[in-house]
Image (tube, rainbow, N blue to C red):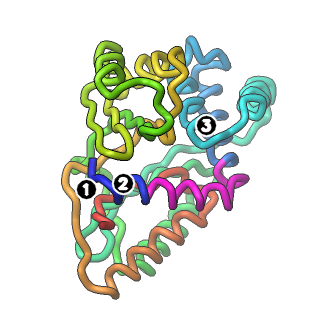
Amino acid sequence: MSGHSKWSNIKHRKEAQDAVRGKVFTRIGKEIVIAVKEGGPDPSANNKLKTVIAKAKASNMPNDTIDKAIKKAANDKDATNYDEIIYEGYGPNGVAIIVETLTDNKNRTAANVRHAFTKGNGNMGTTGCVSFMFDKKGQILIEKEECPMSEDDLMMLVLDAGADDFSGDEEGYEILTTENDFNNVMQVLDDNNIKYVEAEVKMIPQTMTKLTDEESIKRMNMLLELLDEDDDVQNVYHNWDEE
């Protein structure tokens, strides 16, 4: 874990999410539709849905809203069909970027993502051009003040449940899992009433890239803002070291 910056970044991101909570819930709702269509409405038999539910809870999506979204997805045979498309590319100074989208119009989404990269002084690449620089892992973040367990007890709990790695600092704990073990660890945390501020299977960069000049930082922020404003964009991963 990178100490204070990680937790301050989380808090800033949560504040931003609170300001656009409807947009966050809409994005998660799309993921619920995809998961239900692929594996059915029962999370105990649908790992993908279970993973999305964990993400929804970490984003403070109410349980009844989650249940309604699942029921709607299960019952609405005419629901919009979304294609999952992943774009890869580079930001300023070669920052690696992965953009995950769910879209009902591939041409629109491709044009918007390309526009964001261009405005950010970056460029889109081919499939696989940067994904090898990331690992797909479950990441769970827990604030120390919200955890009823000692650090040692929490570490033993999650490692026994299948976690790959556990680390902590003065503000909180980071748990990393394989994609397959993520739901097992989440279940143990839920069973022990341990709250988490983030819980998601995501692309985690192996190495980070720093931006030192103001223009590159400005362009990178512009790129990320344009992607965040795009309703087709679900997740954006990058290896920019924002410290």
Q: Distance between the residues labelled 1 and 3?
A: 30 Å
Nearer-the-camera pick, 176 or 196? 196
- Residue plotted at (35% across, 17% down): 157
- Report which residue position mark 2 lands on: 6
- Residue plotted at (27% across, 53% down): 2
Q: What stretch is highlighted in magenta?
A: 9-24
- Residue plotted at (78% across, 29% down): 64
Q: How far apart are marks 3 and 2 (CA)?
A: 21 Å
**What is the x, y in percent for residue 122?**
34, 75
**What is the x, y in percent for residue 31?**
60, 38
Kindly check if marks 2 and 1 are in contact, taking CB atoms under 8 A apart as contact: no
- Helix or strand or loop: what does disc 1 sit on? loop
- The circle on residue 70 is none
Q: What type is the residue that disc 2 sits on?
A: Lys
Q: Distance between the residues labelled 2 and 1?
A: 27 Å
**What is the x, y in percent for residue 8?**
43, 59
**What is the x, y in percent for residue 219?**
39, 80
- Report which residue position mark 3 lands on: 56
- Report which residue position mark 1 lands on: 129
Vertical side of 15 occupied by 194: above or below: above
Q: Is the magenta stretch mostly helix, strand or loop?
A: helix
Sequence-wise, the earlier of marks 1 and 3 is 3
Q: Is residue 14 magenta?
A: yes
- Residue 65 falls left or right of residue 2: right
- Helix or strand or loop: what does disc 2 sit on? helix
